[in-house]
Image (tube, rainbow, N blue to C red):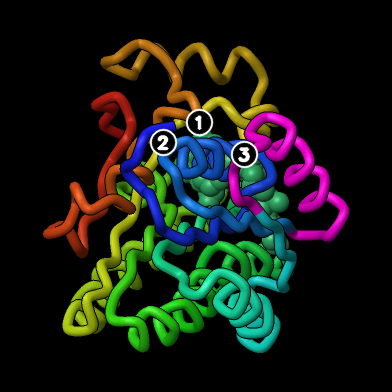
Amino acid sequence: MSELLKNKVAIVTGGTRGIGYAIVRKYVQEGATVVLCGSREETAQKALAKLKEEFPQAQVDAIWPALSDRKSVAEAFNSVKEKYGRIDILANNAGISHNNSFFDYKDEDFDKILDINIRAVYACSRVAAEIMKEQGGGVIINTSSIVSYNGQAAGCGYPASKFAVNGLTKSLARELGRYGIRVNAVAPGVTRTDMLAALPDEQIKPIIAHIPLQRLAEPSDIANAFTFLASDMASYISGAILPVAGAVVI
Ligand code: NAD
């Protein structure tokens, strides 16, 4: 283990798999106490057990609040604060995507995507920021996407939610800076996770052909950016949307 996040307490939403689990692993490796959030108790406990097996010495825990419900989040985050004394880092990573065309888009899918991709980011940030303000500082890192620059040709709800993440990130950075709270976002390019498993191979090859670094992102590539932004190495960085996308322009 190295020391980049030593003595820090971090919460990672959607920490059970994919990019979120990679962030959890990296934060643990850098010495943080890490609390992962799952959507259900069962998946959260399963991910926690796997983590404990890999890092038996680490201080790790799991919670499963309803992320867009501020009351549920407050209960869970306050219990973390009581148990570990503080919350230094919130990584808002949980998210979903749909690729439906506009005319096939279901209203309930649009609501669902906004609920987890942006309303949950608002609710979790609000609760964490209250704790961070009281303790004199903290870091919030949101998960945007490379599609938050120019949208995408199908699945309009997803880029809409990620443009909103950028707006919330920049606004909170300006509003919360005076309390010592930094707020940034990471904008991943196409990353090899379950979210991608839905795409057939013939759709992945042309994606790679357009990436100057000639490969997809691995979850660890994204987790490294989350670690840098969470650490004191990024002490004067706030309001940034950091693309981690192999120089792709879409
Ligand atoms: P994933 O599907 O592998 O994991 C998503 C995580 O979010 C899971 O842990 C899941 O439990 C959690 N989650 C989903 N719905 C939830 C809900 N209602 N309540 C609580 N938790 C919920 O996806 P991933 O690829 O690891 O994506 C993580 C983040 O990265 C998302 O915000 C996504 O938009 C973003 N992102 C992914 C890619 C990519 O190519 N994979 C690219 C850009 C941005």
The range drawn in magenta is 39-60
Question: Which residue is identified by label 2?
Answer: 222
Quarter occupied by residue 215 = top left
Q: Are marks 3 and 1 in contact (CB under 8 Å)?
A: no
Q: Nearer the viewer, residue 173 or 77?
A: 77
The quarter of the rendered structure image containing the N terminus is top left
The residue labelled by disc 1 is 219
Discs 1, 2 touching: Cβ within 8 Å? yes
Taking depth in this image into account, of 71 and 54 the one nearest to the observer is 54
Distance from mark 1 CB to nearest ligand 1 atom below 8 Å: yes
Rendered residue at 71%/39% (across/down): 52
Residue type marked 3: Gln
Disc 1 to disc 2, C-alpha distance? 5 Å
Dot 2 beta carbon under 8 Å from ligand 1: yes
Determine if residue 178 is in view: yes
Q: Label 3 belongs to which residue?
A: 57
